[in-house]
């Protein structure tokens, strides 16, 4: 079992930055791909970015490429999401997610992830 706790959300102006953290418990963290998803009011949860278990491969939604960076520190059981040049359309609840299978490649679909955090709100004002 893996438990995930996000932190770092908040309110920023357009063009600003936020850094989200996701702390994980459980021995399998370093063996599973991790992802970040977001959900805006009235919309479905959508893929933002993902990282392989080793950190060697990363994937991004087109809407965040060049602005967001995912990283992980397996020694600290933590995955990060650095968000720069934020836009009002980035406003959402951001969720950290962990794959249900060890050593599986990162995926973009919600159904590929077994473990989920409670979410953290990120709000970007114009």
Image: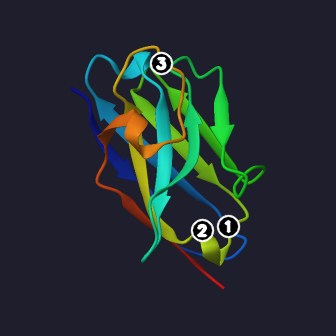
Q: Secondary structure at mark 3?
A: loop
Tell me where residue 98 appears, x and y as whole percent: 38, 33
Total marks shown come to 3
Answer with mark 2 or mark 3, whichever residue precedes in sequence: 2
Q: Where does the C terminus fall, quadrant-wise?
A: bottom right
In three-dimensional space, the C-alpha distance between marks 1 and 3, rounded to whole angstroms, equals 30 Å
* Residue 119 vs residue 103, the one in the foreground: 103
Q: Where does the N terminus fall, quadrant-wise?
A: top left
* 18 w.r.t. 88: above or below: above
Left or right: where does residue 26 sit relative to residue 94? left
Q: Residue at x 41, y 52 (%)?
A: 95
Label 1, on which residue?
Answer: 86
Left or right: where does residue 10 sit relative to residue 120? right
* Residue 102 vs residue 86, the one in the foreground: 102
- Residue 92 seen in the figure: yes
Label 3, on which residue?
Answer: 104
* Residue 3 vs residue 19, the one in the foreground: 3
Quarter location, residue 71: top right
Check disc 2: other Cα within 10 Å, few if <14, some if 14-19, many if 20+: many
Label 2, on which residue?
Answer: 90
Q: Residue at x 50, y 26 (%)?
A: 73
Asked if disc 1 and disc 2 are in contact, CB closer than 8 Å, the reply is yes
In three-dimensional space, the C-alpha distance between marks 2 and 3, rounded to whole angstroms, equals 28 Å
Q: Residue at x 32, y 33 (%)?
A: 24
């Amino acid at each position: 079992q893996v438990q995930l706790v996000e932190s770092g959300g908040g309110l920023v102006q357009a063009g600003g930055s936020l850094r989200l953290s996701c702390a994980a418990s459980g021995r399998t963290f370093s063996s599973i791909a991790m992802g970040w998803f977001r959900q805006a009011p009235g919309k479905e949860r959508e893929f933002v970015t993902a990282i392989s278990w080793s950190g060697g491969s990363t994937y991004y939604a087109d809407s965040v490429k060049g602005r967001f960076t995912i990283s992980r520190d397996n020694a600290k059981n933590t995955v990060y999401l650095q968000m720069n040049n934020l836009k009002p359309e980035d406003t959402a609840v951001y969720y950290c997610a962990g794959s249900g299978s060890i050593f599986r490649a990162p995926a973009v679909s919600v159904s590929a992830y077994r473990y989920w955090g409670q979410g953290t709100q990120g709000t970007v004002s114009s």
